[in-house]
Image (tube, grey):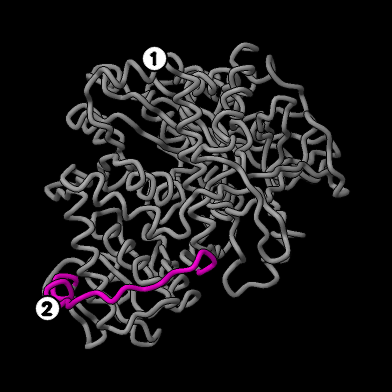
Amino acid sequence: MQNLLDQLTQTKKQLLGAGSPFELGEIEVDSQTYPYFPKAPHNLIELLSSARQQFGPKEFLAWESQRYTFEEFFEEADRLAAGMQQLGIQKGDRVAIAMRNRPEWLVAAWATIKLGAILVPINSWGKRDEIIFGLKDAQPKIVFLDKARHDLVCKDLEGLHVNSILVEGSSEDQSSTHNYLYSELLASAESLNPVEIAPGDFALLMYTSGTTSHPKGALSTHRSIVQSLWNIQFNSALAAMLSPEKIKSFMTSGINPTALVTVPFFHVSGLHAQFFFALLTGRKLLIAWKWDVENIIDLIESEKVTQLNGSPAMIQELLGHPKFSKIDRSSLFALGLGGGAASSKLLDDMQEVQKMGMLGIGYGATETNGIGAQASGDLYLVKPKSAGIISPIVEVKCLSAANEILDDGQPGEICIRSLANMTSYWGNEKATADAIVDSWYHSGDVGYVDADGFLFIVDRIKEIINKGGEKVSALEVEDCLYSNEDVVEAVVFSIPDEKYGEAVMACVAIKPTSTIDEPSLKLFLEAKLANYKIPKHIEIRTNALPRSAAGKLLKREIREEYLSGKVQ
């Protein structure tokens, strides 16, 4: 391990040094000085448009029967942008997208960016009220809708003063003169008038997941997103240089890099790490309509998928499915985790099935445009329980409850300062002031940085259970539950308790063939945890636990179900 850590220091110095594309510098923005990549382009158009010339005839997008080369993608986006200009969309206008993953989502996103408008991805997995909330909050001029979302909200659009563009269907599906068809807009498009975009112009209004409250819109500039993407590219270069044997084995395979997209494009990992990064690097994107583990397994084999990223819950389900071990998955070179802490069992399982693959993990947030810490390849194997090394343009401090900066190894609230951070929450000064203090974003996550610069996540502040003064980490109890071979999914949370104020509660999904019961699980935990950490109750289910669109287990929803008496 020490040998690789020494290599890490030398390789980072080489990559970040003078003359490198990743050369580090400093920049002053709004009276604050930040580390940044001065050789990164000034805006997203400059950064990503080169893909048209570099990769033009290569296949870029695949979804069901639809296939696009890079050239076809850019050509359609240009026509759509010209059509949007004819509708009066100008620089700085907000343009919303409320659709499930499909190629038109990405075409509409790029057309919006090309116009200098602000892209507003809306959670399309939500119910009608959630979509309406996003449209009311962002107040876009237009919204792109697939038919299912159009049918949900079409009667509300006129009252919201937003025009819609329907990406499928015919004129009979148009409910009013405020609606347009995607196909007709493409057909009627004239020439596109270019727009000048400055680094500080706003590019993205992306909503937080909303699993704990109403989602908030994180507003980011072109500069912030470009720096984030340049940082992802730096991490890829670092991982490749530290994992030469793994990279060589893939390069000699002759397989075309293909990323299977299972997370929604309205999530930062789908938009930044999948779509934007594919444009930057020339990867093919295979779009999955939704997370269906059997379909995902079929696609891995039939499309020779080389990369798959997902939440811990998604990857746990994939590796545990009996069909996964029976297919030809020799193409699957990279397997990545994000969006939550992984259990020790999952980390062990990943290493077992991907002995020569590039395993990876990362930590970030919507508010940081997805960056914070990352590790993959051999570097990941050094400290697989970490969230990776701190990114070079990111500063991290961990604060005590008294707001004191803690030393290395001491857990506290993780605070991040970076040029890639959002500017503010849209229209919400109080939430912005609570989250950003003196340019530091307060994440609400508890963790620590070790002496080697690796970040470790301990828990969420709100998920530290206070049982009569004893602090219990929900993540620690979940990790122990996952180590039981009968447990497929687990969440741990607090419930009110007359004696202790709060008590520990667990809800688990078990294998359909399992006969394990609550007393047996408690007995299993007693051999691993202190008595005060043992859940007061363990609810056992045979069906899957509910998840968000990004694959995260919906702990708040499960807790509310339990407290409302819907489950016993």
Check disc 2 and report the residue beneath it. Answer: 172
Q: Nearer the viewer, residue 375 or 317?
A: 375
The answer to whether 278 appears left or right of 172 in the picture is: right
Q: Residue at x 74, y 44 (%)?
A: 413
Q: Nearer the viewer, residue 333 or 98?
A: 333
SS for dot 2: helix
Check disc 1 and report the residue beneath it. Answer: 356
Q: Quadrant of the C terminus?
A: top right
Residue 291, image quadrant: top left
Q: x, y percentage for residue 185?
A: 18, 75
Which stretch did the figure color magenta? 182-201
**Other-residue count near label 1 (Cα within 10 Å), few / some / many at <14 / 14–19 / ≥20:** some
Q: Nearer the viewer, residue 186 or 71?
A: 71
The answer to if 438 sits in the magenta stretch is no
Upstream in the sequence, badge 1 or badge 2?
2
Q: Nearer the viewer, mark 1 or mark 2?
A: 1
The answer to whether 105 appears left or right of 214 in the picture is: left
The answer to whether 436 appears left or right of 225 in the picture is: right
SS for dot 1: loop
Image marks 1 and 2: residues in contact by CB distance under 8 Å: no
Q: Residue at x 54, y 29 (%)?
A: 375
The answer to whether 481 appears left or right of 316 in the picture is: right
Residue 310, image quadrant: top left
Q: Residue at x 26, y 85 (%)?
A: 178
Rounded to the nearest whole Å, what is the CA distance between mark 1 and mark 2? Answer: 53 Å
Q: Quadrant of the N terminus?
A: top right
Which amino acid type corresponds to the residue marked 2 in the rendered image?
Glu
Q: Nearer the viewer, residue 268 or 27?
A: 27
Q: Is residue 353 visible?
A: no
Which amino acid type corresponds to the residue marked 1 in the rendered image?
Met
Q: x, y percentage for residue 495?
A: 69, 45
